[in-house]
């Protein structure tokens, strides 16, 4: 069978994959929720959901560095990756040896397309359809406006989510106006952050684990801002974790 991934690459798979390696935590969780845990043979060390999965499956490295000899020993018939999260040269090496299906996600519609595509490849269309229908209902219209926001993903240097990211899409849905219009994940100085003067400053739990002490520091810089520690998985994971998004955003 021929399938097209989100990089517009054609992937040839002779049968429904039975030995899958997932290099993206959010897509690993999706495969579990599609009922495919028994077909997963390899995951990254960051594939922490569901709890205990990394003890049940072989760890093939992280999202950027791969243990090629371990991957070879697992004899995968499909590897699943993502353009942003995975390192290009390693992925290209894997593409020369195995079928590799890549996602490329900026919007909710991209997520829905990814879920539908993996459901088709894995012959798990019914569960994929159920997830998609629930997400279409949840994301039918944005939540009420809350105000302007800056979303931090890293500290020292300060790094923020820019306009063309999935996080920015989630901010918009949750009711925030993202003040960062630069692309990707730009760095800001403390003074630049002060100059933006957001109503909300959102400190993500990942990839940098912001804590209460960081709230105190940034509150000293932005005494009038509403500073919140937020669940980075719900803002940046684009698989079945999105099922929790609407109810979570309503609590913020």
Image (spheres, rainbow, N blue to C red):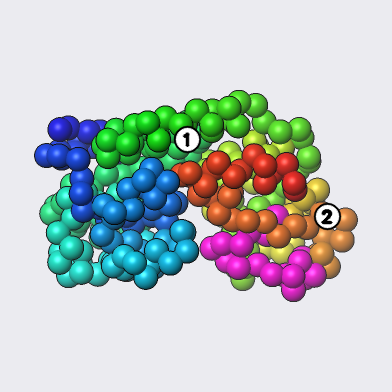
Q: Is residue 161 left or right of residue 10?
A: right
* In the displayed structure image, the side of residue 252 where residue 25 appears, left or right: left
- Mark pair 2, 1: CA separation: 36 Å
Residue indicated by mark 1: 131
- Say which element carries label 2: loop
Label 1: state its secondary structure: helix
- Nearer the observer: mark 2 or 1; the answer is 1
Q: Is 211 contained in the magenta span? A: yes
Please say if 76 is above or below 143.
below
Q: Which residues are magenta?
A: 202-218
Residue at 35% from the left image edge and 64% from the top image edge: 44
Residue at x-position 67% and y-position 42%: 247
Question: In this view of the protein, can residue 23 be seen by the observer?
Answer: yes
- Is residue 125 shown in magenta? no
Q: Position of residue 242 (x, y in %)?
A: 54, 43
Q: Which residue is mark 2?
A: 225
């Amino acid at each position: 069978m021929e399938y097209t991934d989100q990089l517009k690459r054609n992937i040839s798979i002779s049968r429904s994959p039975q030995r899958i390696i997932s290099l993206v935590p959010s897509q690993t969780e999706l495969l579990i929720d599609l009922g495919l845990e028994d077909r997963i043979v390899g995951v990254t060390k960051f594939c922490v959901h569901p709890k205990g999965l990394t003890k049940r499956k072989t760890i093939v490295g992280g999202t950027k560095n791969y243990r090629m000899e371990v991957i070879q020993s697992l004899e995968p018939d499909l590897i699943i990756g993502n353009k942003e999260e995975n390192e290009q040269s390693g992925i290209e090496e894997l593409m020369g040896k195995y079928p590799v299906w890549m996602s490329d996600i900026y919007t909710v519609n991209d997520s829905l397309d990814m879920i539908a595509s993996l459901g088709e490849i894995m012959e798990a269309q019914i569960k994929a359809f159920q997830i998609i229908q629930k997400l279409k209902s949840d994301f039918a219209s944005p939540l009420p406006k809350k105000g302007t926001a800056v979303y931090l993903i890293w500290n020292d240097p300060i790094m923020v989510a820019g306009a063309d990211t999935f996080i920015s899409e989630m901010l918009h849905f949750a009711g925030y106006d993202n003040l960062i219009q630069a692309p990707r994940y730009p760095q800001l100085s403390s003074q630049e952050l002060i100059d933006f003067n957001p109503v909300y400053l959102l400190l993500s739990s990942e990839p940098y684990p912001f804590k209460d002490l960081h709230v105190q520091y940034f509150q000293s810089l932005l005494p009038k801002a509403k500073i919140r520690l937020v669940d980075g998985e719900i803002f940046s994971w684009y698989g079945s974790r999105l099922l929790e998004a609407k109810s979570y955003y309503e609590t913020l």
